[in-house]
Amino acid sequence: MLLQLSPSVHKTEKPLCFLKTSPSLSRDGDLVIGSFLPMHSVEVSNVIGEASLSAFSYSLSLRWLHKNYQQVLALVFAVEEINRDSNLLPNISTLGFHVYNAYHSDERTLESSLRWLSGQGQLIPNYSCLWKDQPVAIIGGATSALSVQMGTLLELYKFPQISYGPFDSNLNDKAQFPSLYQMAQRDSSLHHGIVQLMVQFEWTWVGLVTTDDMRGEEFLWNIRGEMTKYDICLAYTEKLPVSERRHTESQDMFMPRILQSSVRVIIIHGDTDSLMILRYSQPILHYMLKKVWITTSHWDITMRPQWNDGHSFHGALSFSQMTKEIPGFKSFLRTVNPAQYPEDALLKEFWCSAFKDLEKLENEEPNECSPNASLETLPLHIFDMAMSGLSYTIYNAVHAVARALHEMLLVTSERESVRAGKSWMPQPWQLHNFLKEIHFDNSAGDQVFLDDTGNSEAHYNILEYLFFENGTETLVKVGQFVPNAPYGQDFTIYKETIVWGWNEPKAPHAVCSESCGPGFRKTPQEGEPVCCFDCSSCSEGEISKQINMKYCMKCPEDEYPNKERDRCLPKTITFLDIKEPLGMTLVCVALFFSVLTALILGVFVKFRDTSIVKANNRTLSYTLLISLTFCFLCSLLFIGRPTAATCLLRQTTFGLVFTVAVSSILAKTILVVLAFKVTKPGSRIKVWLQPRVSNCIVFLCSGIQVTICGIWLGISPPFPDTETHSQPNQIIIECNEGSVFGFYSVLGYIGFLALGSFTMAFLARSLPDTFNEAKFITFSMLVFCSVWVSFLPTYQSTKGKAMVVVEIFSILASSAGLLGCIFIPKCHVILLRPDQNIQECLRNKSN
């Protein structure tokens, strides 16, 4: 409890350097509300001597913060409104107030608070020189720092402090600040709105300027977490001091870094008082820099020390808290002038300073402070007729205290009657229980709370600050942010309304790396933020349809990427069609050789009684020619769209007819060798020259191949299939062999028979005959084996339609080799040299 002294006990002259510590404005009343409002700014000089209150020297160069005077007028308006209301504070004549200037300095604020507690401008700790007009509550704390500085001292005496500055969750700690109440709405969703704004304009590389306190740290933590969700990065963070204001030093610290940075978009978070350091730190060069400033709700961007430097923040986007219009407040502002309040020296001082600056701006002669002028004529950077968020909160704070006093008076009246003419003087500490329960609707229809849970989430208008060449300025609404609204309706921005500075037709580009267009994906740069990346082309078979894709997506199996790799195109279905030139050519070749083979068979049948035809088993020759005809024709099964039937028949038919052909050649080779063995007298081999032996050889060898094909078809038969990988833009219809082992078993068995025939024919090539058929068989099998040996690696290295062409070519080439090497020489003799087609010419005995 403060001890009170009589005025006669202690009275001294106020020191010259503390002219502003006594009330700047007073209004007598039975109950008094104290208020600390930042009306002047003062620069703190260096420390002199020891660290004591008297050891500091303060500059007397005070500068009016004209726009803050609206807060004083909001306080006056609220008090007058309450005094006119007969339903508030009955039996109490008037409500008064004391207005003190709030200096944003730890030492000055502490000293001012002590002098206020002592009264009459005296600095006597723990004593009060006031017998009356003892304030019952304090309205102050334009910033969190001021609230803490004042609250630490006021808490010693249980004085209720109503903080009207920005909401700070750290001040909700009732264990540390039990007597402090916050009037402002919560701004815990502000960072969501700012990030949504950056998402709308695709800004991903931004800077941040915030205050170096817990409130600034909390905002930094919140906005950084929200940015991460949208891949937005902070290029740098500058923190401003909140206690002292050495503006000349601040320019050397952070402004050069901001100005020299290539970052185009800068977020500014803080209150008006803290961020005045930016206004003092702007060099002329800033006019040439093309930057977009995004400011938060508690900084009045129009406040500045010089009238002509508004161009610095031209085009800035500001989140301003929505406030309803208080009935009668604008009319009150229009009628306010020094003549209406002749006893108000502070108003006269403000009036002269404000209109003196206006006259300088308009190059007019001084007019004795323009007593008949109106506040409405002042430019925006000096005074604003629209109620600010801080003034709105002060208005609510005065009503909250008045209603708490009213409730306290009602409770007191029930306990003891208040005699007429006797003043009712409640103690400040008694007011806490009533302030905690305050909940009412103000004259604008808004609900007002003072408890921790009642404070609602603030809604914001997005305003653009425009500064025109003629020196006029304005704030234009370009959007809004309502945190509790449904998704899609919470954030609105009118892009067409925004006027970008520097004659730019569209929003500036604020990225660390240029966007990766469709067809590319982002590749992070090692050691750099996620916003800094390189662009890499999508891999084969992948596309990206949008810009800045992290990953490319694969096209479906039936589609393929276009050249730009930004969309998928349908693949064309392809197979070895008989209508295409290659298919038609192969069909013609196959038919030609099959007809040729049939003609040769006809020649052999017509000349069946000649020596050449009868030599080496006429039946085997017929069998070989018939099988070769089917060999040529079986290649047609490989041409055309594969079906289940053609897939089952093509390889098995090819395997069987080639086995018959090679088996016939093997039998002919065996007969050639045995024929020369029979010439020896008494040889028993003659019995093996009978026709049924050769037929058995062909039947036995072919039967083994039939068995292999049967097992293959029974276990894993071929089937129609699609192949989508060998050609990126095609779907190839082909026959899947089913069992690869079965397919190569068929080929291997044919190769085994061919190798046996080649070996025996090679051994019999030097037998003494004029027309030794073994020589022709050797050569034919050499061609046959060469074709199929080269077929294997070629077949393995090709895909899709090319595989089919390779197999058809091998079938036709090997069949043509057998036909040409074995039968063409015989046809030459039969048709062109009939004189040699006799028995005597077939034998040429050696000497």
Image (tube, helix red, strand yellow):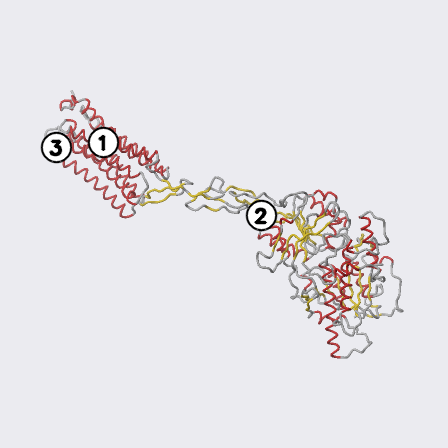
Residue 690: image quadrant is: top left
Q: Which residue is mark 2?
A: 530
Residue 318 horizontal/vertical position (percent): 68, 53
Is any part of residue 89 visible from this angle? yes
For the image shown, how many numbered marks are present on the structure? 3
- The quarter of the rendered structure image containing the C terminus is top left
Given residues 139 and 54, the one toward you in this image is 139
Residue 618 horizontal/vertical position (percent): 16, 31
Amino acid on which the number 1 mark rests in the picture: Thr
Residue 275 horizontal/vertical position (percent): 72, 53
Residue in the picture at 63% in, 45% down = 508
In the image, residue 514 sits, relative to residue 675, either above or below, namely below
Instruction: Please tell me which of labels 3 and 1 falls first in the chain.
Output: 1
Of the residues tagged 3 and 2, which is closer to the observer?
Answer: 2
- The quarter of the rendered structure image containing the N terminus is bottom right
Is any part of residue 49 visible from this angle? no
Amino acid on which the number 3 mark rests in the picture: Lys
In the image, residue 230 sits, relative to residue 439, either above or below, namely above
Given residues 196 and 230, the one toward you in this image is 196
Q: CA distance from mark 1 to mark 2?
A: 74 Å
Q: Residue furthest left?
A: 682
Of the residues tagged 1 and 2, which is closer to the observer?
Answer: 1
Q: Which residue is mark 3?
A: 686
Residue in the picture at 70% in, 47% down = 314
Q: Is residue 110 left or right of residue 739?
A: right
- Report helix, strand or loop for mark 3: helix
Of the residues tagged 3 and 1, which is closer to the observer?
Answer: 1
- Report helix, strand or loop for mark 1: helix
Contact between labelled residues 1 and 3, with CB atoms less than 8 Å apart: no
Q: Residues within 10 Å of mark 3 (few under 14, many from 20)?
A: some
Q: Which residue is mark 1?
A: 597
